[in-house]
Amino acid sequence: MSECKIYGPFTINDFMVGDRVEIQPWLDLWMQGARYGKVIGVKSSVLHIRLDVLPDKFIICGVDHLFARWESKRSEIDGNDAVSS
C-alpha cells in the first residue's frame, strides 16, 4: 500500500474509517508508547481510534489530539472493525 504522512491541523472531514493516525506527543498514552492507531469510527466531532498497543480497547478523541495521519488508497481500506453507529 502506498502511503504518505500528513501533519495537522486537521478537520473531522479529513478522516475516514481505516485511516492510520498518530496521537499528539503531549498525551500520556503517547509517552507510554501507544502512539499509532487506526480510525474505527468517525462521529460528529470525535474519532474512535484503536491503538496498536491496546487492540482490545479504543480511545475517543477530537482532531486536535492528533499529530499526523497517513494518506492511503481508499480502495484498500477495509471497515471490518468499524464502530457501529
Image (cartoon, grey):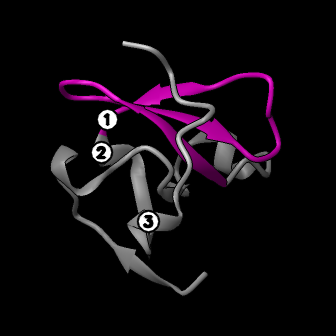
The image shows residue 41, relative to residue 5, as above or below, that is above
Q: Decide: is 84 above or below 42.
A: above
Tell me which numbered mark, 3 or 1, is placed earlier along the sequence.
1
Q: Secondary structure at mark 1?
A: loop
Distance, label 3 to label 1, CA atoms, is 25 Å
The image quadrant where one finds the C terminus is: top left
User: Mark 2 touching mark 1, by CB under 8 A?
Assistant: yes
Q: Position of residue 28 (x, y in %)?
A: 64, 39
The secondary element bearing badge 2 is classed as helix
Q: CA distance from mark 3 to mark 2?
A: 23 Å
| Residue positioned 40% across, 65% down in the render | 74
Amino acid of disc 3: Ser
CB of mark 3 within 8 Å of CB of mark 2? no
Q: Residue at x 76, y 47 (%)?
A: 52
Identify the amino acid type marked 1.
Gly
Callout 3 secondary element = helix
Q: Nearer the viewer, mark 3 or mark 2?
A: 3
Earlier-in-chain disc, 3 versus 2: 2
Residue 40, placed above or below residue 5: above
Label placed on residue 62: 1
Q: Name the residue: 20% across, 44% down.
A: 12
Tag 3 residue = 75
Mark 3 burial class by Cα count in 10 Å: few <14, some 14-19, many 20+ = few
Q: Is residue 51 left or right of residue 19?
A: right
Residue 66 location (% of width, % of height): 41, 52
Residue depicted at 72% across the width and 22% down the height? 57
**Which residue in the protein does label 2 denote?**
63
Examine the image and state in which quarter residue 17 appears: top left
Crowding around mark 2 (Cα neighbors within 10 Å: few <14, some 14 to 19, many 20+) is: many
- Nearer to the camera, 76 or 30: 76
Tell me the magenta residue range: 36-62
Q: Nearer the viewer, mark 3 or mark 1?
A: 3
